[in-house]
Image (tube, helix red, strand yellow):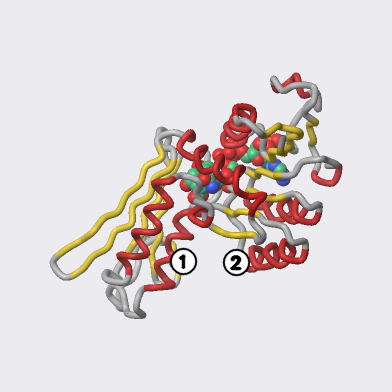
Amino acid sequence: MTKVLVAGFTGAMGQQAVALVNQTDGFELTAVFAPGVTSTDPSAYGLPATVTVFDQLSSITTDAEIWVDFTLPEAVYPNTRFAIDHGISPVIGTTGLTDEQVADLQQRAASQHLGGLIAPNFGLSAVLLMKFAQEAAAYFPDVEIIEMHHDNKKDAPSGTALNTAKLIDAVRPAHQQGNPDEHETLAHVRGGDYHGIKIHAVRLPGYVAHEQVLFGGAGEALTIRQDSFDRSSFMKGVKVALQKVRHLNELVVGLEKVL
Ligand SMILES: NC(=O)C1=CN([C@@H]2O[C@H](COP(=O)(O)OP(=O)(O)OC[C@H]3O[C@@H](n4cnc5c(N)ncnc54)[C@H](OP(=O)(O)O)[C@@H]3O)[C@@H](O)[C@H]2O)C=CC1
Ligand SMILES: O=C(O)C1=N[C@H](C(=O)O)C[C@H](O)C1
């Protein structure tokens, strides 16, 4: 049995991750972590007595071999660092790690000879969207991204949209996009800017997680879209990550690295 700790277990994704671990042969939930819990009695959350509930990072002592993280952008770096420093393989779904933080965590994992995975999106449709968008950007360098999420989402832009922009930026030819004399008569109306790629974030009730990448060319346009209608869409990817992460020997970014 591979023992798993779920950080952020009371959240929308954490609850799904707990259910997944409980349903997956060969894996056992050994601990959970969320700072806002009012009780550390596992039965209060419908968990068996064998599961230890933690409400502080510094108090965690565990035999977990895998750390699944669906928490908050401000918590994910200290959490992942804690996991790596304790020899626990991280499976990180939380968004918001900076490039510098990822590099630092990769170095720490390497010095521990530990594998791990950071996935901006565990949904297959989103992974494919990012791949196709990068392919298209070589031919259509004029591009904007629209991401649409539920209105409880705390971070913007989404990790997926930012990662899409980075992938596009890595391949698209350098050029001037849009009118150089453009000016906003309503602040921020043109969206966020990642190296000249505009990102627009929509937050509405009823939505879960959706992204469109719009390419424009002379007399034509290409739109690539993915929709996660339900958080179950992420669980197939998390399951693959659980099954593969202990076989990795470095901290990798992107679900496609283990598919
Ligand atoms: N990679 C992917 O495929 C996906 C990634 N995500 C990402 O996962 C993250 C969580 O999303 P979601 O579940 O919707 O968020 P929620 O707000 O529903 O849950 C957040 C969880 O994090 C916990 N938490 C808050 N602060 C800390 C902390 N300092 N240390 C540890 N845990 C903490 C909360 O506990 P408490 O209530 O006690 O504060 C809660 O359990 C986001 O970054 C989101 O973007 C979401 C969907 C898919
Ligand atoms: O907060 C969410 O819900 C999601 N977060 C991830 C992101 O920021 O990209 C993945 C997915 O979009 C759902």
Under mark 2, the amino acid is: Asp
In primary-sequence order, the first of circles 2 and 1 is 2
Alpha carbon separation for disc pair 2 and 1: 11 Å
Question: Above or below — where is 17 with respect to 214?
Answer: above
Q: Position of residue 228 (x, y in %)?
A: 41, 40
Q: Are marks 2 and 1 in contact (CB under 8 Å)?
A: no
Q: Which residue is at the front of the view, 179 or 47? A: 47
Which residue is rendered at x = 61% and y = 43% of the image? 242
Quarter that holds the N terminus: top right
Q: Residues within 10 Å of mark 1 (few under 14, many from 20)?
A: some
Q: Which residue is at the front of the view, 34 or 26? A: 26
Q: For residue 175, what is the image quadrant?
A: bottom left
Left or right? Give the position of 74 relative to 122.
right
Which residue is rendered at x = 27% and y = 63% of the image? 215
Residue 156 visible in the displayed image: no
Q: Residues within 10 Å of mark 2 (few under 14, many from 20)?
A: few
Ligand 1 located in image quadrant: top right
Residue 181 visible in the displayed image: yes
Which residue is rendered at x = 40% and y = 51% of the image? 147
Q: Which residue is at the front of the view, 64 or 46? A: 64
The secondary structure type at the circle numbered 1 is: helix
Q: Position of residue 9 (x, y in %)?
A: 67, 34
Under mark 1, the amino acid is: Lys
Q: Position of residue 229 (x, y in %)?
A: 40, 35
Left or right? Give the position of 237 relative to 110.
left
Q: Position of residue 32 (x, y in %)?
A: 73, 35
Residue identified by numbered label 1: 166
Residue identified by numbered label 2: 99
Q: For residue 49, what is the image quadrant?
A: top right
Residue furthest toward the left? 219
